[in-house]
Image: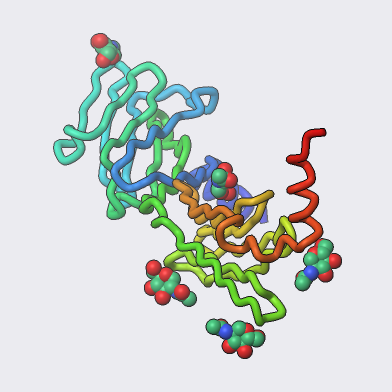
Amino acid sequence: MMAFRLLLSCVLLMSGFSAEISVFVQTGDSVQLDVPTQELPEFDIFFWKNYKSEEIVRYLNIIKKVKLCDSYKNRVDFNNKSFSLTLRSMQKTDSGHYTAKASGESDNNIVTYRVSVIDAVEIPVLTVNVNRSSPDPCSLKCNGSNIITIRSIYNSSSCSPEDVTSSDNYKLRLSCSGDSIMCNYSNPVSWKTDIKKVNELCAGFQGPERKHAKEASFCVF
Ligand SMILES: *[C@@H]1O[C@H](CO)[C@@H](O)[C@H](O)[C@H]1NC(C)=O
Ligand SMILES: *[C@@H]1O[C@H](CO)[C@@H](O)[C@H](O)[C@H]1NC(C)=O
Ligand SMILES: *[C@@H]1O[C@H](CO)[C@@H](O)[C@H](O)[C@H]1NC(C)=O
Ligand SMILES: *[C@@H]1O[C@H](CO)[C@@H](O)[C@H](O)[C@H]1NC(C)=O
Ligand SMILES: *[C@@H]1O[C@H](CO)[C@@H](O)[C@H](O)[C@H]1NC(C)=O
């Protein structure tokens, strides 16, 4: 039993308790991966490895020397004080796990990042459909390219806000405020909107009383 427990704790130590941090990067952008330095033990060599377990950078502590892998040389910066790694011009194929390791008397995983490189969202399309003979005379439709379209109805000066989020974190939100209708399409790296003014399109639904009230306010006695 004791032997089993020792073995188990050994396995746990080797696999490390280092946290996995999820980061999203827009295609073409840079990302900086930091090292929580308080978790850095005594070490001889420090590495950053990619998802294929290839070394991107190797830092030899004793001689304070940095070695960069050839295939990354032109697009990484390694900070020899903080040990953070900056990767530039990220492409979708760069998505994956990046791990900082320190090795001395033992090997330690210091931190692991799960990097997801995704494109910015496309501009959504907001459609306003006016049909005077329908019970819902001013209907709204908000369409984000890879998400279900959402609909709502404009009524007086508001609409019930609707939103939907997909499993891969794309979000579409339709809302109205005063005389504007907004369709907001977003993902973890970007957001874009299509905004339309209500006045021109759904003006017919302000009701005669409101029109009078508006006109009255222009009277100066
Ligand atoms: C650390 O990096 C700075 C800036 O790139 C450089 O000037 C310095 O020589 C480096 N120090 C070591 C010990 O490598
Ligand atoms: C307008 O609404 C009416 C009543 O719901 C419906 O019969 C008609 O087809 C609609 N017209 C258009 C152009 O959608
Ligand atoms: C939403 O927009 C996409 C791309 O612009 C288009 O292909 C799709 O047909 C639209 N869907 C609806 C329900 O309008
Ligand atoms: C418009 O909104 C008002 C207040 O929220 C509500 O009482 C009314 O029933 C709505 N009308 C329609 C046609 O949805
Ligand atoms: C659009 O949605 C995103 C994500 O929810 C948010 O950060 C952003 O502020 C919204 N834009 C506007 C104009 O409301």
Q: Kindly tell me whether residue 63 is visible in this rendering.
A: no
In percent of width and height, residue 190 lies at 45, 47
Looking at the picture, tell me which residue is in the foreground, 67 or 130: 130
Residue 113 image-quadrant placement: top left
- Residue 14 in view here: yes
> Is residue 196 positioned above or below 108 on the image?
below
* Quadrant assignment for the N terminus: bottom right
Name the one closer to the observer, 154 or 61: 154
Could you tell whether 134 is left or right of 123 in the image? right
> Could you tell me which residue is drawn at 53 percent across and 71 percent down?
149
* Residue appearing at x 41%, y 34% in the figure: 33
Which residue is the extreme one toward the left?
A: 70
Measured as percent of width and height from the top left, residue 198 is found at: 60, 56
| Left or right for 196, reference 162 | left
| Picture quarter with ligand 3 | bottom left
Residue sitting at x 28%, y 54%: 93
**Closest to the observer, 82 or 175:** 175
Give the left or right position of residue 155, taking residue 87 as reference. Answer: right
